[in-house]
């Protein structure tokens, strides 16, 4: 495997592999048919190297499957963060990183010429001006170096903000970073602070922890910037097969929708082509390209704020599929004396729906939402208590009855001809 | 400004650690790479750090064969703009008050001055978080949280009185092991052992929001314990075994929704079905059961018998309700 490196240039490709290893947990080499064998072997080896103890191998007649297996509620550090810590670099990158900081850590500011001269005279390192200038520009953008014009010359100094000083100066900050580095959102940045300060999370675990979200975090800053700047973006989706053309779509992003129960995150956006609001799964988006400002953004945002209140989850509905769906009403039966916790559950999980007591031990949930279908996945968590379903669409109601009938058969129940 | 940058990378971090000392040696380089690097880093990084003609020239070999750094001082750890933006965003999170007092928050806000927060609360919308999440701004809650956190950090034995999920009052002497947060519930809990005569009686979980009082006994729990033992004591004896079909994109939906669980998947290529073994905390059995039921006939609980019969009982009851029985 000549030329293999455990460092990578391109995060998108790795995202796809890590996701497949992590989510499916049973894919074998031949499943990755859209990639070359060499690519698969290299990516697999990298993931093995980063994830170490979390790798699992199973042999079958179809080949050896590789997966990442972790109970994410029982780990103190998300192992997928390692993917972010594997960016490749040049020899000049690492040398200039340490040498420029070594020169500038005395607090004084210097010109480009002074810096290249010092590198040569005191460190015996010969760099051309352009290389150093590019690095200084890059580090100014990263906030590591401050650039200030004095007269005609640009002076560079090192930022005075030190990770370890912040941690020791602000009481409680270390614990806060330990927590937020594992909790959503963008925890990998907190983890990078901890790594820099030499601290480890020894206090917190996160339950219902969708670690895989960290791979999508690479897209989040650009989305948020587009929202703040009221800009459109072009999203490029991952292709499903090798011969697929990656799909591109122009959208105006409004918000990031997070489902803490299904493990999915979406961009809620206005789609100029269809003139509708839609949601796009973050894990299916490969790249984002920023577009120009949307002149109509404020009006669209106002519409979005009104519309999102009628979403039970993330769906703005599809008129072709749903037609004119009416409000849906689901009635539940509860033993009020012995099961007050069921009423509490309905209250805390009903979201935008309205819950009313409609009879002795009967509670009816009404929801006037764009896509009543979204309620049904949740409603099925109350199997055994649903007395009736009214409204919505006939298709939704029929599917529920049919599902219950099939499940009854599946679990060996007695068939009753009355159910349709 | 980029999340995926070598400045946060493992190789840069290892180099920084080695540059802390004026002089190092080959063994220290290899040991540090082995300890701090990825599994295969030891095959690639040492030869980049140890002078050999193809190295990064961060060290020079001395006559006594030690390695002297080319820098004059230990590397400084600069907080990047991205890290400061992240911190600024977290200062607007109500949970920050669990860790820092108002005065400290204000000082840090002033220090971060003109830094733009990386995100604002309203950029995100949690679509399905439970409505009865903890009130992180409640003074009593904050005080209880801090006492509990201090107990975790210093292994202090604490007396706690609280009310259970069913509303009953309970109290006892506990050692708190770790804190847990659930984004779905919006609640903090403490993993704990109940103590009787200073001995571990049973393992448990206490919701911080249900604590009425928590008092430091002034004593420290010195018996060694491991989190693995704690988690094992709470793990289901047998995994749930689930048959997952691809109807309605069931496989992807199931795998994503259960991504946070420890699981083992076997695929039947002929039937295009998956059999998944799923491990969970025994206390979460009902939660797991209702999550499974929400998939309808797309999945089937094959075992263990107890879990399957619970599903069967609920489905039969539901079938009866729809048939008017």
Image (cartoon, rainbow, N blue to C red):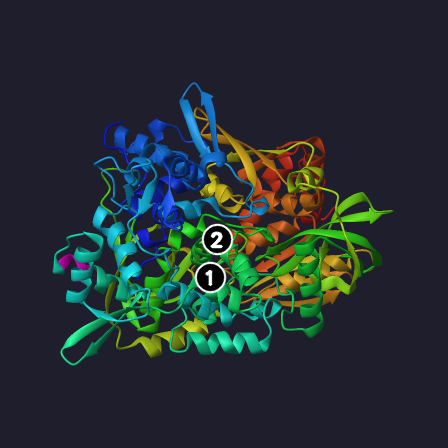
User: Bounds of the magenta span?
Assistant: A130-134
Q: Is residue A132 magenta?
A: yes
- Give the main secondary structure of the magenta stretch: helix
Percent of width and height locating residue B217: 81, 59
At 63% from the left edge and 40% from the top edge, which residue is drawn? Answer: B280
Marks 1, 2 in one chain: yes
- Left or right placement of residue A166 versus residue B18 in this view: right
B8 or A198: nearer the eye?
A: A198
Q: Which corner quadrant of the image does residue A412 belong to? A: top right
Q: Is residue B141 magenta?
A: no
Q: Do tag 1 and tag 2 residues touch (Cβ < 8 Å)?
A: yes
For residue A238, which numbered disc appears in the image?
none
Quadrant (top left/top right/bottom left/bottom right) for the N terminus of chain B: bottom left
Q: Residue furthest front?
A: B63
Q: Residue furthest right?
A: B197
For residue A198, which numbered disc appears in the image?
2
At 39% from the left edge and 53% from the top edge, which residue is drawn? Answer: A216
Percent of width and height locating residue A27: 41, 31
At 26% from the left edge and 73% from the top edge, which residue is drawn? Answer: A294
Report crowding for label 2: few under 14, some 14 to 19, many 20 or more residues within 10 A (C-alpha).
few
In the displayed structure, B200 sits above or below A115; it is: above
The number of discs equals 2
At 44% from the left edge and 45% from the top edge, which residue is drawn? Answer: A80
Residue of label 1: A164
Percent of width and height locating residue B12: 34, 49
């Amino acid at each position: 495997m000549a030329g293999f490196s455990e460092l990578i240039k391109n995060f998108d490709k790795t995202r796809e592999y890590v996701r497949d290893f992590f989510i499916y947990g049973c894919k074998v080499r031949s499943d990755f048919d859209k990639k070359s064998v060499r690519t698969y072997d290299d990516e697999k080896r990298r993931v093995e190297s980063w994830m170490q103890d979390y790798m699992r191998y199973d042999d079958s007649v179809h080949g050896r499957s590789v997966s990442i297996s972790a109970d994410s509620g029982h780990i103190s550090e998300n192992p997928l963060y390692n993917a972010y810590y594997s960016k490749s670099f040049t020899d000049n990158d690492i040398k200039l990183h340490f040498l420029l900081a070594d020169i500038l850590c005395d607090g004084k500011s210097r010109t480009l010429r002074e810096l290249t001269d010092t590198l040569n005279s005191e460190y015996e390192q010969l760099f051309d001006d352009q290389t150093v200038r590019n690095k200084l520009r890059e580090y100014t953008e990263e906030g590591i170096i401050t650039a200030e014009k004095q007269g005609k010359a640009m002076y560079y100094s090192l930022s005075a903000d030190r990770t370890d000083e912040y941690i020791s100066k602000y009481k409680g900050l270390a614990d806060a970073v330990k927590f937020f580095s594992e909790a959503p959102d963008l925890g990998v940045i907190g983890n990078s602070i901890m790594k820099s300060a030499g601290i480890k999370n020894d206090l917190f675990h996160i339950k219902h922890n969708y670690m895989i979200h960290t791979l999508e975090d690479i897209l989040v800053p650009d989305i948020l910037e587009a929202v703040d700047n009221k800009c459109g973006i072009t999203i490029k989706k991952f292709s499903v097969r090798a011969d697929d053309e990656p799909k591109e779509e122009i959208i105006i992003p409004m918000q990031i929708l997070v489902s803490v129960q299904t493990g999915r995150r979406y961009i809620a956006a206005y789609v100029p082509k269809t003139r509708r609001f839609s949601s796009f799964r973050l894990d299916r988006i490969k790249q984002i390209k920023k577009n120009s400002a949307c002149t109509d953004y404020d009006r669209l945002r106002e519409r979005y704020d009104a519309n999102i209140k009628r979403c039970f989850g993330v769906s703005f509905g599809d008129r072709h599929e749903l037609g004119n769906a009416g409000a849906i009403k689901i009635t539940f039966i509860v033993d009020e004396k012995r099961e007050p916790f069921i009423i509490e559950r309905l209250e805390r999980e009903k979201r935008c729906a309205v819950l009313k007591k409609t009879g002795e031990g009967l509670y009816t949930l009404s929801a006037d939402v764009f896509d009543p279908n979204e309620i049904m996945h949740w409603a099925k968590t109350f199997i055994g208590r649903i007395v009736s379903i009214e409204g919505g669409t006939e298709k939704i109601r029929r599917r529920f009855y049919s599902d219950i009938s099939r499940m009854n058969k599946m679990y060996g129940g007695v068939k009753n001809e009355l159910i349709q | 400004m980029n999340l995926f940058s070598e400045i946060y990378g493992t190789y840069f971090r290892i180099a920084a650690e080695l540059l802390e000392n004026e002089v190092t040696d080959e063994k220290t380089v290899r040991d540090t790479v082995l300890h701090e690097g990825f599994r295969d880093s030891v095959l690639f990084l040492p030869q980049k750090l140890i002078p050999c003609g193809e190295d990064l020239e961060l060290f020079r070999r001395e006559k006594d064969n030690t390695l002297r750094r080319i820098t004059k001082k230990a590397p400084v750890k600069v907080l990047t703009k991205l890290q400061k933006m992240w911190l600024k965003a977290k200062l607007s999170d109500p949970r920050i008050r669990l860790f820092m007092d108002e005065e400290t928050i204000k000082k840090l806000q002033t220090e971060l001055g003109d830094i733009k927060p990386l995100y604002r609360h309203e950029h995100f919308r949690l679509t399905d978080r439970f409505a009865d999440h903890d009130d992180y701004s409640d003074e009593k809650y904050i005080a209880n949280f801090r006492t509990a956190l201090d107990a975790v950090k210093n292994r202090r034995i604490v007396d706690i009185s609280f009310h259970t999920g069913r509303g009953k009052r309970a109290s006892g002497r506990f050692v708190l092991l770790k804190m847990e947060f659930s984004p779905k519930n919006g609640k903090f809990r403490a993993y704990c052992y109940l103590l009787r005569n200073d001995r571990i009686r049973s393992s448990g979980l206490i919701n911080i929001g249900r604590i009425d009082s928590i008092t430091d006994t002034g004593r420290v729990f010195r018996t060694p314990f491991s989190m693995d033992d704690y988690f094992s004591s709470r793990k289901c004896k047998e995994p749930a075994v689930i048959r997952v079909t691809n109807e309605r994109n069931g496989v992807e939906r199931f795998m994503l929704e259960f991504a946070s669980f420890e699981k083992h998947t076997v695929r039947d290529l002929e039937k295009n079905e998956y059999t998944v073994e799923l491990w969970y905390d025994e206390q979460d059995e009902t939660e797991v059961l209702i999550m499974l039921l929400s998939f309808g006939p797309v999945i089937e609980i094959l075992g263990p018998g107890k879990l399957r019969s619970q599903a069967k009982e609920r489905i039969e009851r539901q079938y009866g309700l729809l048939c008017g029985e």
